[in-house]
Structures are given as C-alpha cells and as structure tokens.
Image (cartoon, rainbow, N blue to C red):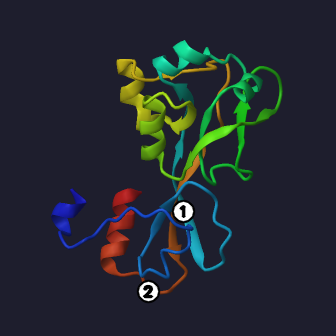
C-alpha cells in the first residue's frame, strides 16, 4: 500500500554493516543486531521469535538433537553477526538461565533467505525467525527441533542517521512501519 502512495520510493536489500547505509545515501536501515554507532538512532519495530529447525531429509540422515549440547554433533547453518559471538547459539529451556552452545558452522550467511533455502535443501540445522519459515513448518518442509528449548527473541530495529531534518517521504514510511 505504501508503494501506491509513493511510487518513487525505492526499497533495496543490502547486506553490509548496519551503519553503512548512511555512506551509501540511504535514509534508513532495518537490522536485527544492536548497532554500536553514535551517528544513528534506533527504534524497535518488533520482537522476532526464532526457531531451531531442519529438513526431514537431514534429520533422517543425522538424527534429531534433543538438547542444545547435542548440536555440537550436527552441521549448523548460522547467521553471521546474529549473536555477540559468532559460532554460538543461546537457548532458554529446562532449568534456570540460558544455555549457550558452541556450534560447528558448515554454512554461514547474513541472509535469512539464503539460510532458509540451505536448511530446506538439507545442509544442516538452522536458527531462523519463525515468520520466514512458518509456511515451511506447516507443510512439513522443515521440522522444529528441540521443542523444550527456545531461542531468545530478537528485536527488529529501524535505524536512522542522527539528523534534524527527516524528509517527509521517510517520516511517512516510518509511520507506516510503526
């Protein structure tokens, strides 16, 4: 609907450092990880639920992990810069506190879409946002594993350059998103 109102608006998907959008001349960026950059202002749009999943083909060949510790014996497909320390996944579940597990990443990407395709193809186990795989889970292309554990939700953030003037089109787009 927003594109109908502002047909000249250009939405582009780039995978670069979260604050690079300013150097490229873009007005805002959507990002999953916290940005430690003083030149940007962040605003939470949503909390995303994450799911640990694999394809039926992968699980038939390698077995299904029941606990986070069992992930060490599996091929994992990880999202670059999702955790503070790449190569670790955090879970909440049985018992108090968090379980942080060091995973063996056989495939790494900073794109949820690329990771989704890789996990469907049976390359390993992935931790993906539920919205991106909900249909795959319903039709059986992916299976949620370790149902007794869950990954902490992560915030989808909108970042804007710190400046006094925000163009009208950008202000309206921000209102549309929020």
Query: What is the distance, in whole Å, between disc 1 and disc 2 at their CAs?
Result: 17 Å
Residue 167 found in image quarter: bottom left
Counting from the top left corner in percent of width and height, residue 48 is at 53, 42
Label 2: state its secondary structure.
loop
Residue carrying label 1:
43
Q: Quick one: quadrant of the C terminus?
A: bottom left
Residue 18 found in image quarter: bottom right
Residue at position x 60%, y 52% from top?
80
Q: Are marks 1 and 2 in contact (CB under 8 Å)?
A: no
Residue at position x 59%, y 20% from top?
145
Left or right: 76 as drawn, with respect to 1 = right
Viewer-proximal residue among 55 and 148: 55
- In the image, residue 166 sits, relative to residue 171, either above or below, namely below
Residue 38 found in image quarter: bottom right
Counting from the top left corner in percent of width and height, residue 19 is at 56, 73
Residue at position x 46%, y 37% from top?
118
Left or right: 170 as drawn, with respect to 3 = right
Counting from the top left corner in percent of width and height, residue 73 is at 72, 25
Residue carrying label 2:
165
Label 1: state its secondary structure.
strand
Mark 1 burial class by Cα count in 10 Å: few <14, some 14-19, many 20+: some
Left or right: 134 as drawn, with respect to 44 = left
């Amino acid at each position: 609907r927003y594109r109908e109102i502002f047909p000249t608006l250009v939405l582009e998907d780039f995978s670069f450092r979260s604050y690079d959008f300013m150097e490229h001349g873009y007005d805002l960026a959507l990002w999953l990880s916290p940005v430690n950059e003083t030149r940007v202002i962040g605003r939470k749009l949503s909390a995303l639920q994450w799911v640990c999943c694999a394809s039926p083909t992968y699980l038939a060949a390698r077995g299904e992990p029941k606990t986070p510790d069992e992930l060490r014996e599996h091929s994992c497909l990880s999202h670059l810069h999702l955790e503070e320390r790449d190569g670790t996944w955090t879970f909440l579940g049985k018992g108090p506190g968090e379980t942080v597990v060091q995973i063996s990443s056989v495939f790494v990407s900073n794109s949820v879409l690329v990771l989704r395709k890789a996990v469907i193809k049976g390359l390993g186990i992935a931790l993906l946002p539920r919205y991106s795989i909900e249909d795959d889970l319903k039709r059986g292309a992916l299976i949620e594993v370790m149902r007794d554990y869950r990954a902490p939700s992560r915030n989808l953030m909108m970042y804007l350059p710190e400046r006094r003037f925000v163009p009208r089109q950008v202000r309206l787009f921000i209102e549309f998103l929020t």
